[in-house]
Image: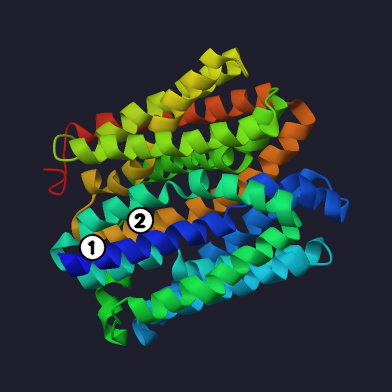
Amino acid sequence: MRRNLTILAILALTQITGWGAVGTLPVIARPVAAGFGSALPPVFLGTSVMFVAMALAAPWAGRAFRSHGTQRVMSWGAGLIGLGLCLLALAPNLPAFWAAWALIGAAGAMFLTTAAYAYLAEQADEAARGLIGTLMLVTGLAGSVFWPITAFLEHLLGWRGALLAYGAVMLLLVCPLIRFALPGTPPAAAATATTATPPARKGPVFALLVVAISLNSFTTFGIEALGIEILRSLGNELPAAIAIASALGFCKVGGRVIDLLGGKRWDGLSTGLVSGAMIPLGLAILWLGGAGTMGIGGYLLLFGVGSGAFAVARATMPLVFYSKADYAAAMATIALPMNLINALAPPVLAGLLTGIGPQAVLGLLGALSLAALVLLLRLKALARPAQSPAAA
């Protein structure tokens, strides 16, 4: 137990730092755009490039885990993220800026989230599921912790100085911590956790799962990437917008805690339905209330808790329909369109925000989340007549 807790503490610290370091764009986008003489959408394209590169590099990263050991590959990924952040800080123009984001995305496939979960699966055996859930809870705080720090560093050092500081932290702290403080893994240990055998996943159930998860992922990730800009467009000053966005992160963690506490009493689809209904309600309250206290409060409570719980539900809903043997392959298949959707969200919403305004953007996101809820209701109807052995 003590060994597992030590591993969890190191992974939590390094994953929060990694996601915080690569999640700076919502705070520094405007000064970056001013520095390049660009509009906001091309700047937010950097996040899209990162997620596309992360999706495309994932199969290669899985083979690297098996060949070299997950812990070693994670340390390489952390170092490459640090290098990519330094290249971002030194980028003379937008093409160089996007190229640095591509490097960060490829490195993220080696270090962020999936790699950490695979490492826990190798090291913790039966305790892995609980540790993965706890790590998911903790990493949800990355934005809440790092957005205020990023705003302070940007004010003190400028956006280039802030990125250089984060690059140094990844190179000099996170990379050595992963390499020397975590127990090593032999190259063959990762095979079970990362090998996906393609199951038969054709048919309406899988299609409904993919589309419902992707629609809500576009909505929640779009808010995460553009939330500060949307709040500013609604009339909030930058410090208030950052504070609200940070509070949203804590509300998301609350949603994950609620799902964790009730995880043995209901399945992932039930969590998905409840949280999927909260997401459009929260957006509707913000759309109606704007920057007022009621609008912000309802948005934080409903959208924050709902999106946090849905983050857990999208990882557990496939277990309602697929056996544990098929689960990993199903999630791997879902991950590709989900990451591509995540990649589209920042530039698309940034362009819409400047073109049609925050109210219309909130209306569009609300409509997408409502469509996802309809699909989840259809999945619930399909689950009733024939529950899978995994659900039972």
- Residue situated in front as seen by the camera: 20 or 153: 153
> Which of the 4 image quadrants contains residue 252?
top left
Q: Is residue 65 above or below residue 207?
A: below
Measuring from the top left, give residue 293's x and y in whole percent.
Answer: 55, 15
Up/down of 73 relative to 109, above or below: below
Amino acid tagged 1: Leu
Q: Residue at x 34, y 35 (%)?
A: 254
Left or right position of 241 against 73? right
Q: Is residue 197 visible?
A: no
Closer to the camera, 213 or 102?
Answer: 102
| Along the viewing direction, whichever of 17 and 136 lies nearer the viewer | 17
Q: Is residue 128 above or below residue 60?
A: above
Residue at 24% from the left image edge and 57% from the top image edge: 131
**Can you name the residue that lies furthest to the right here?**
37
- Residue at numbered disc 2: 331
Badge 2 crowding class, 10 Å Cα cut-off, few under 14, some 14 to 19, many 20 or more, is some
Q: Which residue is mark 1?
A: 5
Position of the C terminus by quadrant:
top left
Quadrant assignment for the N terminus: bottom left
Comes first in the chain, label 1 or label 2: 1
Say which residue appears at 28% left-offset and 86% top-offset. Answer: 186
Instruction: Give the structural element (helix, strand or loop) at label 1.
Output: helix
